[in-house]
Amino acid sequence: MSTTLSVEDLDFIESELSFDDKVSLLFILYGQRNPRYLSQIITIACRSPEEETHFLFDWKNHAAGPEWSSELLEALLIIQANLCLVKCGLDDDELRERFLPHVIELTSFVHPVLKGMYLLCEKMDDGVAEKVIDYLKKNHSVGILDSRFFELVLLALISEDLVRLGSKSAGEECDLLLLVACFKSLDLYDLAEFCKRIADSFNKELTNKQNQSDNVQGSSNFKQIPKIEDQQQLDPDRYYILKQHAGIILIINQFKFYRDQNPELKDLLPLRPLNDRRGTEVDKLAILNIFTAFGYQPLVVENIPHAEILSQVEHAVNSVKSTHCSLVVCLLSHGQEGKIYGSNSIPVNVKSIERAMAAEKLTGKPKLLFVQACQGPDLQSAVEIPQKLEHDGPSSEKTASVFVDFLVAWSTVPGFASVRHIEKGSWFIQELCVKLRELHQRDHIMDILTAVINDVSGKRGYANECMVPIIYSTLRKKLFFEPLKNK
């Protein structure tokens, strides 16, 4: 499928857009070029919003540069006009991977502050907009032509030089102090912080650019990836896991087991010896493959007794730097409800592992815990496991994450066994890794896990056995991974 636009596409695209979407799109395209002109043509068009327009054709001929197709594609993705692009025969998924519209201040051709200002408009309802307009009229001599769209208010501020978008090519800083002061005066502190961080992010990148060698072409002025902590604070509803800041992944892989001879631990041993977990190596490699591609630094430990499990988790926590954005722990072992086994066949409560992960230094960072282990002795079909399928476990304390910014994913619901193929790995881990690679470029982690549950629950073994994974989450935001360049 194509990933570029032709001149012939312009009128069709415009006919597919609502008038509101036209205003948003033109704001992004014209905002730094000619805000006064844009204010005038939008104000005139508001009188007859149903009439046919040719704004994009005019923009392409009179305002846009040689990269007009890419700039327009990026702007259309920002305003979420994806259906329009699909109707043009474009590959929606490939475009999203290319332009990252969900990452607030990361742009390729569009001015990053205009992208942020568009998102600001989306955050404001009519009541808030009216309060802001009243404040501006009382405290600043702003010639607002029309208040039906907050984009027009912003265009007036830009035209009067009360808001400065900034220019990386000219070395000019962004200045949104008037908006910040306005929002603070109206007790709209979230919006004030949003504007402040948009400006700070732009200006930090500008400073970095000025300190670097001048080998960046003008068309790529906005390609530098911002710091993950800045991105997460810009949008209160999303975490962004960027490759350069991803964090640590700890994999505890238990595949050989023995029975601890300490008499004090005798009562904790399972009734029957635990079998070696054939197939777990496939799971370990699949996890390493996808998470290192996401940028995680791996820590892998294998066949450790129960007493070392918590110390390894604590070591992983201590390895997370302030610049990292997350911690991932994967537990591959036998288990019972709410517990996993050390290599010495002594169980560890997963709740204690969660407590170790809930360190103060990780406050505000997402913590992901994936557990491939049984939560009970029974298969969900209540039949014996056939030749090449095994279950991870030999019951009953409930476990659930009660900590903020946690996600805990078990391979099976409490009380049931977890199916693992001795050659192909476990159903849960294999499907998790496949779905992460397939869906991460457009879906957040909870949507990805929903797809995992759907596919795993639909699988059947040789004797019709099945399993259903279960997710516990206290994540406060949607979590997205930076799209991989090569799938």
Image (tube, helix red, strand yellow):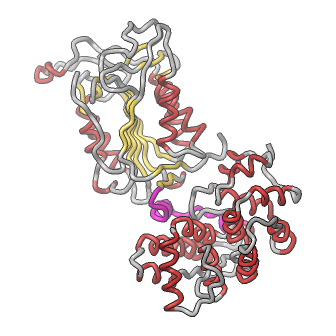
Tell me: 452 left or right of 378.
right
Query: What residue is at 66 percent from the left and 76 percent from the top?
Result: 168
**Measured from the top left, where is residue 316 in percent x and y?**
35, 45
Specify the quadrant that holds the N terminus: top right
Q: To which quarter of the image does residue 157 belong?
A: bottom right
Q: Count every numbered label the image shows and give the total.
A: 0
As for residue 231 lying within the magenta part, the answer is: yes
Q: Is residue 341 visible?
A: yes
Q: To which quarter of the image does residue 70 belong?
A: bottom right
**Measured from the top left, where is residue 24 in percent x and y?**
66, 67
Query: What residue is at 64 percent from the left and 77 percent from the top?
Result: 152
Specify the quadrant that holds the C terminus: top right
**Measured from the top left, where is residue 211 in percent x and y?**
60, 75
Name above or below for residue 57 compared with residue 417.
below
**Measured from the top left, where is residue 112 in percent x and y?**
62, 68
The segment highlighted magenta reads: 220-237
Tell me: 204 left or right of 415.
right
Query: What residue is at 30 percent from the left and 16 percent from the top?
Result: 377
Query: What residue is at 81 percent from the left and 70 percent from the top?
Result: 59
Tell me: 80 left or right of 465.
right
Name above or below for residue 185 compared with residue 429.
below
Name above or below for residue 161 compared with residue 392.
below
Name above or below for residue 189 compared with residue 363.
below
**Most foreground residue, 275 or 39:** 39
Q: Is residue 211 visible?
A: no
Tell me: 257 left or right of 411.
left
As for residue 389 lying within the magenta part, the answer is: no
